[in-house]
Image (spheres, rainbow, N blue to C red):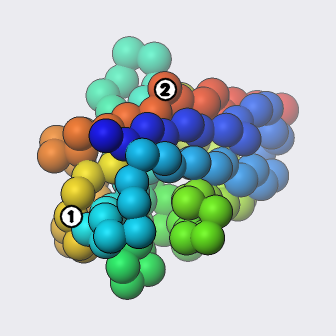
């Protein structure tokens, strides 16, 4: 079983930056099939896919809404995935979740509600406001 814990959320001004972390535990060195997706959900809104990264290749995918502003990366030695968020906008305000699936690669379209992801963190709040 996999466990995920997000951290790094908080309050930031528009145009500011924030880095979220997703610590993953419960897998072994032989568990090479693993992707980590980032999702967000604002109150009253549907959950939205943000990004995805493959453990084995490091190849990343981004939703159009964050492309060019957000960067996802991973440190396999720390079993941690990061979401670097720059040029933040008020519309980025949401609870951000990381999720895991036992796949080798991310799908081409990351704009998903999270179907196929079996393991989820509990989320971290990101608020972008002046």
Left or right of 2? Residue 24 is right
Question: Which sits earlier in the primary sequence, circle 1 or circle 2?
Answer: 1
Q: Residue at x 16, y 46 (%)?
A: 116
Residue located 44% across and 80% down the image:
58
Quarter of the C terminus within the rendering: top right
Q: Quadrant of residue 120?
A: top left
How many marks can you see?
2
Could you tell me which secondary element the residue under label 1 belongs to?
loop
Q: Position of residue 53 (x, y in %)?
A: 40, 68
Q: Position of residue 8 (x, y in %)?
A: 72, 41
In the rendered view, does 45 fall on the left or right side of 115? Answer: right
The one of 113 and 100 positioned closer to us in this rendering: 100
Badge 2 density bin: few <14, some 14–19, many ≥20, Cα 10 Å: few
Q: Within 10 angstroms of label 1, few (less than 14), some, or many (20 or more) residues?
A: some
Which of the labelled discs sits on residue 92, or is there none?
Answer: none
Percent x, y for residue 19?
71, 53
Vertical relation: 67 (above or below) 101: below
Coordinates of residue 109 in the picture (x, y in percent): 22, 64
Residue 91 visible, this angle: no
Residues marked 1 and 2 touching at CB (< 8 Å): no
The residue positioned farthest toward the left in the image shown = 116
- What residue is disc 1 on? 103
Examine the rendered structure and indicate whether residue 112 appears above or below residue 78.
above
Could you give the CA–CA distance between mark 1 and mark 2, rounded to whole angstroms?
A: 21 Å
Q: Residue at x 26, y 52 (%)?
A: 101
Q: Residue at x 23, y 39 (%)?
A: 118
From where the camera sits, is residue 115 visible? yes
What label sits on residue 122 in the rendered view? 2
Hey, which residue is sitting farthest top in the picture? 44
What secondary structure is marked by label 2?
A: loop
Quarter of the figure with residue 3:
top left
Task: Quarter of the image for the N terminus: give it.
Answer: top left
């Amino acid at each position: 079983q996999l466990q995920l814990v997000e951290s790094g959320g908080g309050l930031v001004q528009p145009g500011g930056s924030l880095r979220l972390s997703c610590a993953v535990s419960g897998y072994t060195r032989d568990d090479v099939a693993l992707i980590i997706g980032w999702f967000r959900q604002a109150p009253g809104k549907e959950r939205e896919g943000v990004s995805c990264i493959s453990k084995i290749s490091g190849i990343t995918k981004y939703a159009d809404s964050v492309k060019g502003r957000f960067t996802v990366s991973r440190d396999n030695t720390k079993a941690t995935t990061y979401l670097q968020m720059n040029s933040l906008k008020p519309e980025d305000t949401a609870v951000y979740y990381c999720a895991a699936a036992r796949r080798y690669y991310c799908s081409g379209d990351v704009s998903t509600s999270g179907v196929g992801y079996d393991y989820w963190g509990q989320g971290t709040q990101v608020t972008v406001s002046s």
